Image: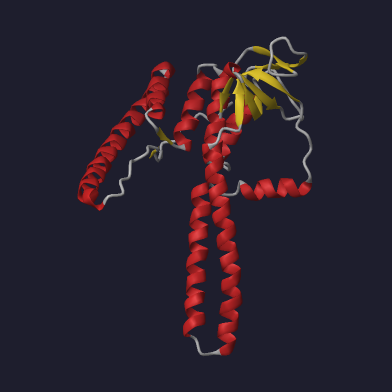
Amino acid sequence: MIKDGLKKAAVFKLYRTKSKMISSTFAIIIFVIVTLSSNSLNAEAINFEQQYEIAHQQYNEANFDSALVVYQSIYEAGFTSAELLYNIGNTYFKLRQIPSAILYYERALKLAPNDTDILHNLAIANSRIIDKIEPVPQLFFKNWWETFYKMFSADWWAIISLIFLALFLLLLFTFIISGNRAIRKVSFFSGLLFLLITIGTFGMASQKYYYTKSINEAIVFTPTITVKSSPSASSVDLFVLHEGTKVSLLDEVDGWKEIKIANGSVGWMPSESLKGI
């Protein structure tokens, strides 16, 4: 059974681009606009949090269609969080739309890679699909790297980076003002180490952020699809996939996507058969 408890502590993030103007003449106007838009966005966020609670209520009353409409309206407006995506996945699962449930569990997992509830429900959903593809064994150091990479979200990697940056600046200050040679030596080498850690963790935060924004994986949404050897309907048939299967995206040509499955097999599928994670 899936873990049925909804996640209530949703933190919504609005991804919208704000224009920036260079001329100082408009500085006051920009300040006023940004202030007003911030107030508007805050009010909008409060409104969506109220809708979020309504969706909870509909879900708990087993009105899954109604709950899904509200959840999707929040998501399509640009607000998102791991909690919201997880709840959408649960709702699709209740409606027995397993490919959609898998899609939203996978999207939630990109934002919260170590969430045990998401991992549990994703495993249950994957057990309901036809394709059981054995992944290619990975080298031990690659497994270690992936475990380390998934330890924290982009936000947490950024926080860690800022902490080590602060420590580096503190040691730099100590190095500058200290007259003791031993203290200067320790602060220099410790500061150098913290600087390297800062650069590394900042790189992890940047990579993790790019990963959450990029679409490098997808879920098959066609009940049965034949994967081709090239981006053409007349090309050689390679293997068959079914809805709900996760694939990696390698390339795209004229409405076809080159995909790779967990066992290493590669082929081409029509783009409309896939939905990006």
Query: Toward which corner of the image does residue 65 lie, by quadrant?
Result: top left
Q: Quadrant of the C terminus?
A: top right
Q: Residue at x 67, y 12 (%)?
A: 224
Residue extending farthest top: 234
Question: Where is 268 relative to 162, above or below?
Answer: above
Q: How many marks?
A: 0
Q: Estimate the x, y position of residue 191 in percent, counting from the top left.
A: 56, 73
Q: Quadrant of residue 143?
A: top right
Q: Residue at x 25, y 38 (%)?
A: 40
Give how far across and how far down residue 234 sits, in percent: 72, 9
Q: Position of residue 108 (x, y in %)?
A: 52, 35
The colouring scheme, among rainbow, by chain, secondary structure or one colour, is: secondary structure
Seen from the viewer's position, the closer of residues 33 and 36 is: 33
Q: Is residue 175 above or below residue 236?
A: below
Q: Quadrant of the N terminus?
A: top right
Can residue 104 be seen here? The reply is yes
Residue occupying image coordinates x 47% and y 78%: 173
- The residue depicted at 64 percent of the width and 20 percent of the height is 128
Based on the displayed image, in which of its 4 quarters is residue 84 positioned?
Answer: top left
Residue nearest the observer in this picture, 97 or 176: 176
Task: Tell me if 50 is positioned left or right of 64 in this view.
Answer: left
